[in-house]
Amino acid sequence: MISRIQLLRNIGQFDSVNTGATIPLARLTLVYSENGRGKSTLAAVLRSLATGDPLPIAERRRLAAQHPPHVVVECSGGPPPAVFENNTWNRTLPDVVVFDDVFIDENVHSGLAVQAHHRQNLHELILGAQAVALSRELQHLVERIENHNRELRSKEHAIPTAVRGPYSLDDFCALAARPDIDQAIQEAERALAAAREQDAIRMTAAFESLNLPAFDLAATERALQQDLPAVDAATVARVQEHLAGLGRGGEAWVADGIRRISQGPGTTGAGTCPFCAQDLTGSPVLQHYRAYFSDAYESLKRTLADTLRALNDAHGGDVPAGFERAVRVVIERRQFWSRFCDIAEVGIDTAAIVRDWRAAREAVISHVAAKQAAPLERMGVSAETRALVAAYEARRMSIATINQRLQDANGAIGIAKERAAAANSAVLADDLARLQAVKARHEPETAARCDEYLRERTAKDATEQQRDQARAALEAHRTQVFPGYQTAINLYLARFNAGFRRDSVTYANTRGGPTCTYNVLINNTPVPVGGSDPAPGEPSFRNTLSAGDRNTLALAFFFASVDQDTGLTNKVVVIDDPISSLDEHRALTTVQEIRRLGERAAQVIVLSHKKPFLCRLWEGSDSTMRAALEVVRDPAGSTLRAWDVAQDAITEHDRRHVRLRDYVANGTGDIREVAGSIRPHLEAFLRVACPEQFRPGTLLGSFLNLCEQRCGTAQEILGHDALEELRAVVEYANRFHHDTNPAWETEAINDGELRGFVERALSFCRR
């Protein structure tokens, strides 16, 4: 409860006002103020006291004031009193609720428009304080979710789409790690490559063995060891002696000659020399030649020739080049097949092999050639040649090992061919993409970012769960409150004699917060007051409700919300100008509702610039629980003082009656003022006595003519005698009325005559 307004300094019209400290406020407190004197400033001070918001006071800082506003209010919760100083309150009084222009502007409408924030604030107004706290908590949770979403978007951008592959971020982060991921990716890549190159795989052959022929040193050495055992040593010595004198190739030359002698006529004899045609009968060496160059000799020569030819066939000609081509084919096929299966490296140094091969071949051939030159000479393979052949043989063994690996690889190639023939490249591509995403997901940097994202997502899920719980609780509360609020609103609109009702009061959750929509029901036709602007020319809030209707709607909102407040018994209700000039026909109803409110609230403070309205409130209230003050002008601006409501409750008609009565009884008063009061006194009486015929705006002369027309009829207003008496008194009173006598201010007045007509006017009004 507010007890006193002790100080108003440097705010609005109040320079430094402390007179309120001597004016105690009561359970019902009336504050009268002319417009512009400071009534709204007082309402703003009390609103600031309720909320703790300094703005309502700060924005009314007195112009040209040297110091900031300073307010002291004695109220519940102290001592000390509530003090506003240095733009802040030392404490607040949250049980204060205020109806004023700010309430209307925040909760109902601004001018002709109902905007989104009006509907949101109205939603809170309907819910009540406890549910408003729940609604704000819900909105706070919604904002937290928005923050989570912003953080999630930021963390999502830190994990590029290129890294995630075909997966959403949530699916990507859910991918489990695999210890064999690299091997799995390699196998998947090979399988996909095979599926995409099915024709090439089908057409490409497996590996063929590399052929690197061996040297048969044993056979070669046997050939080198052969001689002619049937020829005696003397023959051999004699022939070799002779051949030595023939020079290089002599043995072959002689052997060819012996064949020619043997093939000629008369081969049984010595024969003729095929070169000089001389008879050879007496030749001392011919018989030795025949024994030496026998069939065995020819056989030996053939053996050596065959050995040499076999060496050349196996190791000479294009054979090394063919081996090199075969190696290149193996390497090329390995490059092809290694894309689809595991193929060991083929490390073959063909140049080294061919080099060792050539050296061994030439060494062996040189032995055979030397034997051919001296067939009967027993020869052997040198150690150097054996070393060369051994080096070549080591090369050959390495090729054999490679051949074994190639044969093993052919098994894998066969499996790759089978898989490729039945493969689905789309499925394999998906498998590979998944494996690559798994690998990328668990890279250290990406894994850290995914963990941050998942933590934020978990936090968001928890906040969403809290939001859903709060929303369910709020929904349950709104389901109970909204129908009752609509009923309460319509009850007040009916009491205020409004020509409309409210219908379809509903609520909705939007991104901007919970909001409220409703219809204004006029002539059973709903006019929506919702979230979208009406089309031009369509019925809307702005064109279906008058200014008075809009003010009445706002007041009904306020009273209905106060009714819903379970803590009303502790509330201080401040009402600033509840009626306007357009609401005069609702003044009595408003007075009645404020009286009812005063019986339930801790305190009601009503501020108005309409004395009659406040006087009605005063007259019907408990004299022990009421107080009144007024805001009046002083040299510095405005000040507060106690208000004598009883004095201002006397009407002007009452004052004229007292003036006329005192003049007749005591002869007191200004006689010109008394004379000028006769006609207004009669008019006021007639408007009450004959309201249907003498309506506001009707001239007195017209009324007298109407009375005369109806005199003696069923619609008679005044009898003949009363009408004549009234005309006589009015005729006298017109001499002192500005509308009927331009010289009314200088008209001569006789005291006796005046007294007689005053008595007659008072007597007429007593009829």
Image: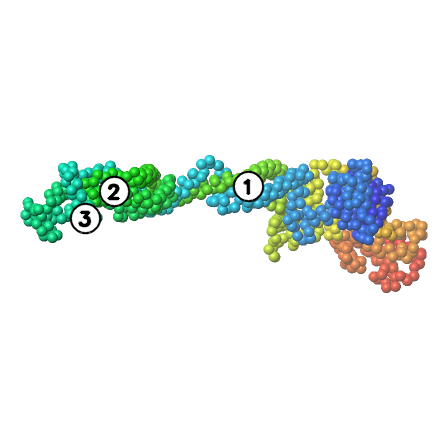
* Residue 452 in sight in this render: yes
Residue 304 coordinates in the image, percent (x, y): 20, 42
* Mark 1 residue element: helix
Residue beneath the point at 28% across and 39% down: 382
Residue that mark 1 sits on: 449
Instruction: Give the alpha-carbon distance from disc 3 to disc 1, as whole Å.
Output: 97 Å
> SS class of the residue under badge 2?
helix
Q: Give the amino acid type for the residue marked by disc 3 in the picture.
A: Leu
User: Percent from the top left, x then y, of residue 104?
Assistant: 70, 48
**Residue farthest along the top direction in this orientation:** 179
Rendered image quadrant of residue 394 = top left
- Residue lying furthest bottom: 742
Circle 2 sits on which residue?
A: 367
Does residue 533 appear left or right of residue 673 in this picture?
left
At label 2, counting other C-alpha atoms closer than 10 Å, the crowd grade (few under 14, some 14-19, many 20 or more) is many
Q: Which of pointers 2 and 3 indicates the residue nearer the eye?
A: 3
Secondary element type, mark 3: loop
Q: Which tag, 2 or 3, sits closer to the chain's start?
A: 3
Q: Amino acid at mark 1?
A: Arg
- Closer to the N terminus: mark 1 or mark 2? 2
Residue 767 visible? The answer is no
Name the residue beneath numbered marker 3.
246
Judging depth in this view, the residue of 580 and 355 nearest the camera is: 355
Which residue is drawn at the image coordinates 23% and 44% (left, top)? 369
